[in-house]
Amino acid sequence: MMRNNDKIEHYLNTLPDIETERLIIRKFTPDDVKPFFEMMISAEVVKYLSGSINSIEKAEKFLKKQIDKYSIGNGSSFAVVLKESGELIGNIVLNIDKENYSAEISYVINDKYWNKGYATEVCKSLISLAFDSLDLNRVEADVVDLNKASIRVLEKIGMKYEGKHRQAAYDDKTNSFHDFEIFSVLKKEYKKNIV
Ligand SMILES: CC(C)(COP(=O)(O)OP(=O)(O)OC[C@H]1O[C@@H](n2cnc3c(N)ncnc32)[C@H](O)[C@@H]1OP(=O)(O)O)[C@@H](O)C(=O)NCCC(=O)NCCS
């Protein structure tokens, strides 16, 4: 039977909040500019990320772009907030490739909240969304080779290492090139592990 995009289209047109045990993943709002900026100016947070959000104006512009995309069925970047306090502690990206029934995820957590399992919790819920609700076939993540915490997250959520893009990442902080390590999980692997 031919696949169709209905579930993906419905999701992209509604972008519902997602609730996990301790977190809510929701659309950004203009009120998020300040906490988002405060998260993104940490040198630790941006160590392995490309591009930089080093002014409140850049943060505002970045979030406006994400918010504008929600209304045209093209949203991919979301706020991660603590359920208990509503505090913004992260940013998650789910980039869906509708034609190929695949998605790429990436994530940032405010360094005040590292090593509490938050990134793992967010990624697990996005993988469940991808396979259980949207019927995608593949979820991928690309990580700079030095980013051991991120690689650990991907291992914890059941992703498999599939290879590298050699020296695909330029680091302007150290003027050096790094490999992008490619991880992925397929729907059949995900289903096998949970049943
Ligand atoms: C990667 C990142 C999102 C992880 O967030 P987090 O909420 O701390 O992740 P978790 O707590 O779920 O898991 C982190 C795991 O990495 C491990 N870890 C942390 N630092 C590590 C290091 N330097 N080397 C190896 N493992 C490390 C932790 O011990 C933990 O594993 P464990 O549960 O087996 O002990 C966070 O470090 C971050 O925002 N980094 C900056 C942005 C970034 O690089 N994003 C990834 C782009 S793909």
Image: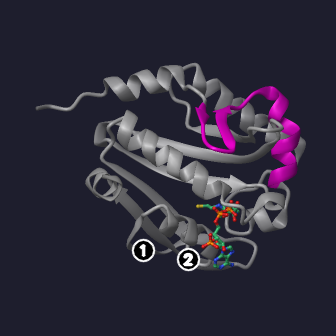
Q: Are marks 1 and 2 in contact (CB under 8 Å)?
A: yes
Q: Is residue 77 above or below residue 185?
A: above
Q: Please state the quadrant of the image where ligand 1 appears.
A: bottom right
Element type where label 2 sits in the image: loop
Element type where label 1 sits in the image: strand
| Residue displayed at 75% across by 63% down | 114
Relative side of 46 to 34, left or right: left
**Mark 1 crowdedness (10 Å alpha carbons): few <14, some 14-19, many ≥20:** some
Q: Quadrant of residue 51?
A: bottom right
| Residue displayed at 45% across by 48% down | 127
Image: magenta residue range: 18-40
| Circle 2 residue | 145
| Residue displayed at 11% across by 32% down | 1
Q: Earlier in the sequence, mark 1 or mark 2?
A: 2
Mark count: 2
Q: Position of residue 6 (x, y in %)?
A: 32, 23
Q: Is residue 187 above or below residue 116?
A: above
- Mark 1 to mark 2: distance in Å? 9 Å
Q: Is residue 27 found inside the magenta-colored segment of the image?
A: yes
Whether residue 147 appears in this view of the structure is no
The amino acid type, in three-letter code, at marker 1 is Lys
| Circle 1 residue | 164
Q: Position of residue 15 (x, y in %)?
A: 54, 26
